[in-house]
Every structure is written in C-alpha cells, then in structure tokens.
Image: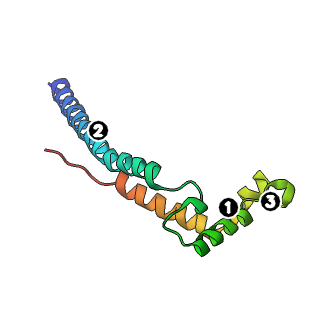
Amino acid sequence: MAYRIDGSFYSSFVTSRLHIYHCLNHVSQIEAIPTLIMAVMILLFLPSFPFSASFLTLRERAIAQARLNRDHKPQSHGGMTGWSGLKAVVADINSWLFMLVYASCQSRLLCIDLQFH
C-alpha cells in the first residue's frame, strides 16, 4: 500500500512539473516576440555610423565621431590591449552596477512561483 501512495504522489508531482514546464515554454515564446520585433527594427532603422544618422545635427555627428575616434584607438596608437581593457571594465563601477541590476532582475524572474491549476 505504501508503494502505491508513494508512486501516485511521485506521478502527480512529475505531471504537475511537466505542466509547469509546458506553460513556461509558451511564456518564453511569447516573451521572444517583442525581442524579435525590436531586433528587426534596430537592423532597419539604426544607423551604422554617427555620420550617417539623419536624426543628429552636424555638430552632434562631429561630437559622436570624435568620441568614437578617442575611445577606439588601435593598440599601436596608445589604445588598450585586451588585458588592459578587461582591467578597465573590472575597475569600472558602472560595469558592476549594470551586472547587479541585471542579476537582480534575472533572479527575481527565476524565483517567481508559477502556479497553474
């Protein structure tokens, strides 16, 4: 008798978990739709370079291009190597804050108790 109770409990547990995973699959597919729409819109409307951005003024284009030139120097012209770039990212507080916000949002989403009846 105990075997039957344990077996029925286990099968109901597995069945309920499979139902939750099946529903989560649909949720993830629904969440993917806005991401795909945004990706297509970015590919179509976001300019490749600041000087080709029609929504910027000539002064803003020049400023954006100067910032890109300053930030993206090759190593031969005083730019960072791979390791120095990694050290700069690790030392930057904004990188850590971004990671904290991202991890907080992800852990909150993963801890939601989904109950589908």
Residue 31 picture location, percent across and down: 31, 48
Say which of marks 2 and 3 sits in front.
Answer: 3
Q: Which mark is residue 25?
A: 2
Residue placed most toward the observer, 21 or 36: 36
Quadrant of image for the N terminus:
top left
In the displayed structure, does residue 63 sit left or right of residue 15? Answer: right
Q: Which residue is mark 3?
A: 79
Identify the residue shown where x is 60% and y is 64%: 95
* Disc 1 and disc 2 in contact, CB within 8 angstroms: no
Which quadrant of the figure has residue 86? Answer: bottom right
Residue placed most toward the observer, 51 or 31: 51
Q: Which residue is mark 1?
A: 89
Question: Callout 3: helix, strand or loop?
Answer: loop
Q: Is residue 58 above or below residue 9?
A: below
Three-letter code, disc 3:
Gly
Q: CA distance from mark 3 to mark 1?
A: 14 Å
Question: Callout 2: helix, strand or loop?
Answer: helix
Q: CA distance from mark 1 to mark 2?
A: 35 Å
Residue 36 picture location, percent across and down: 37, 45
Q: Which residue appears farthest toward the bottom when viewing the image? A: 59
Residue 54 picture location, percent across and down: 50, 64
Pick whichever of labels 1 and 2 is earlier in the sequence. Answer: 2
Question: Callout 1: helix, strand or loop?
Answer: helix
Residue placed most toward the observer, 111 or 4: 111
Three-letter code, disc 2:
Asn
Which quadrant of the figure has residue 63? Answer: bottom right
Pick whichever of labels 3 and 1 is earlier in the sequence. Answer: 3
Residue 7 picture location, percent across and down: 20, 26
Say which of marks 3 and 1 sits in front.
Answer: 3
